[in-house]
Image (cartoon, rainbow, N blue to C red):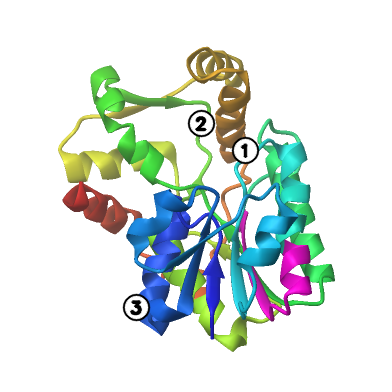
C-alpha cells in the first residue's frame, strides 16, 4: 500500500508523513512537494507536485493507493481548481482513497468565510469524485499563539476581537496522528470529522500560557474594527483581513463546536494545557 501526502514540506504535511512512517514504514510513504528539496529531510520518496499543475500530479500519483490532500494556501478563488487538479489526477491514476484536510469555520458573514467556502466546495468535489473519502475539518492551530509569545510578553496581553467566544483549538501533531488513522483504517470511509480539542475562551488561553510559561498575560478584547485595522497595518490587507476574520468567527461562535477527534484517532484529543506544555518542552 502506497500512501502519498501533498504539501509534505509544510508543517502539517510533514507531521502526517512522520506518523505514517511509524504506522506503515517509510518505504510505503510518498511525500509530494512543490519544491522537492524542502521535503527531502523526511527520508521518504519525494515527488514534485505543484497544485497549479495537473501534469505534475498525473506523475506524482502514479502507483499510489491513497492520497492525503492538504488544503492549499493560495487565494480562495484559486484553491478550488488547484484541489480539483489533485482529485482529477487521483481518479486518472486509479487512486482508491482520498483524505482531505478541510477547516472548521463560519461559511458566511466573516472575512475568513471565503476560505471556509472554498474548503466546502472541495469537500463537495471529493464526495462527487466516486473515490473512497474521509474529510477532516481542522480547528484553529494553537502553535501560532505560542510562536507569538515574545510579542505577547512584551505587550503583557493577548489582544484580539474574540470577546467571550470559545475556540476549539488543535495542533499539528494531534492532527498528524488523526490523519494517519484516517488514512490507514478503512472504518472511516465516508465520514466528516471535526478535528478539534476542548473549546476555550481567550482568557482561558492566557491562563494556560501563564501556567506553563510563568507569564502574567491578560486578555484584552478590542472591537472588530480596531482589530481589523491593526492586523491590516501589520500583515497587509489580505492576511490581516483573514486573521481578523478568524477572531470574528470565534466571537460569533463558529469555533465553539463538538469534537469528533476520538472517532477519527481512536483516543481523546490532548488537553490544551498538555499541548502548551509539550510545545514548551520541544522549543
For residue 88: magenta? yes
Task: Place residue 19 in its image quadrant.
Answer: bottom left
For residue 231: magenta? no
Question: Mark 2 or 1 closer to N-term?
Answer: 2
Q: Secondary structure at mark 1?
A: helix
Task: Place residue 237 in its image quadrant.
Answer: top right
Residue linked to disc 1: 249
Which segment is the magenta one? 87-103
Residue under the image location 37 percent in, 37 percent down: 145
Residue under the image location 69 percent in, 81 percent down: 96
Distance Cα–Cα, label 1 vs label 3: 36 Å
Report the front residue among 226 and 93.
93
* Picture coordinates of residue 62, whole percent (x, y): 64, 74
Q: Which is more foreground, mark 1 or mark 3?
A: 3
Q: Is 26 placed above or below 226 here? A: below
Left or right of 60? Residue 77 is: right
Amino acid at each position: 500500500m502506497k500512501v502519498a501526502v501533498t504539501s509534505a514540506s509544510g508543517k502539517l504535511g510533514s507531521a502526517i508523513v512522520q506518523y505514517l512512517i511509524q504506522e506503515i514504514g517509510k518505504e510505503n510513504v510518498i511525500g509530494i512537494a512543490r519544491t522537492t528539496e524542502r521535503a527531502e529531510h523526511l527520508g521518504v520518496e519525494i515527488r514534485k507536485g505543484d497544485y497549479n499543475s495537473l501534469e505534475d500530479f498525473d506523475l506524482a500519483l502514479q502507483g499510489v493507493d491513497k492520497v492525503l490532500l492538504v488544503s492549499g494556501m493560495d487565494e480562495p478563488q484559486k484553491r478550488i481548481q488547484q484541489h480539483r487538479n489533485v482529485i482529477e489526477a487521483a481518479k486518472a491514476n486509479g487512486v482508491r482513497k482520498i483524505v482531505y484536510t478541510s477547516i472548521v469555520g463560519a461559511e458566511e458573514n466573516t472575512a475568513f468565510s471565503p476560505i471556509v467556502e472554498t474548503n466546502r466546495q472541495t469537500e463537495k468535489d471529493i464526495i462527487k469524485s466516486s473515490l473512497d473519502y474521509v474529510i477532516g475539518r481542522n480547528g484553529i492551530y494553537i502553535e501560532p499563539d505560542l510562536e507569538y509569545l515574545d510579542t505577547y510578553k512584551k505587550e503583557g496581553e493577548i489582544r484580539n476581537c474574540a470577546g467571550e467566544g470559545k475556540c476549539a483549538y488543535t495542533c499539528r501533531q494531534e492532527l498528524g496522528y488523526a490523519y494517519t488513522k484516517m488514512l490507514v483504517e478503512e472504518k472511516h470511509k465516508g465520514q466528516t470529522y471535526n478535528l478539534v480539542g476542548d473549546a476555550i475562551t481567550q482568557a482561558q488561553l492566557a491562563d494556560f500560557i501563564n501556567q506553563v510559561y510563568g507569564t502574567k498575560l491578560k486578555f484584552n478584547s478590542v472591537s472588530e474594527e480596531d482589530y481589523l485595522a491593526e492586523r491590516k497595518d501589520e500583515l497587509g490587507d489580505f492576511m490581516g483581513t483573514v486573521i481578523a476574520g478568524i477572531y470574528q468567527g470565534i466571537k460569533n461562535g463558529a469555533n465553539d463546536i463538538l469534537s469528533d477527534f476520538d472517532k477519527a484517532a481512536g483516543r481523546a484529543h490532548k488537553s490544551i494545557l498538555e499541548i502548551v506544555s509539550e510545545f514548551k518542552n520541544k522549543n
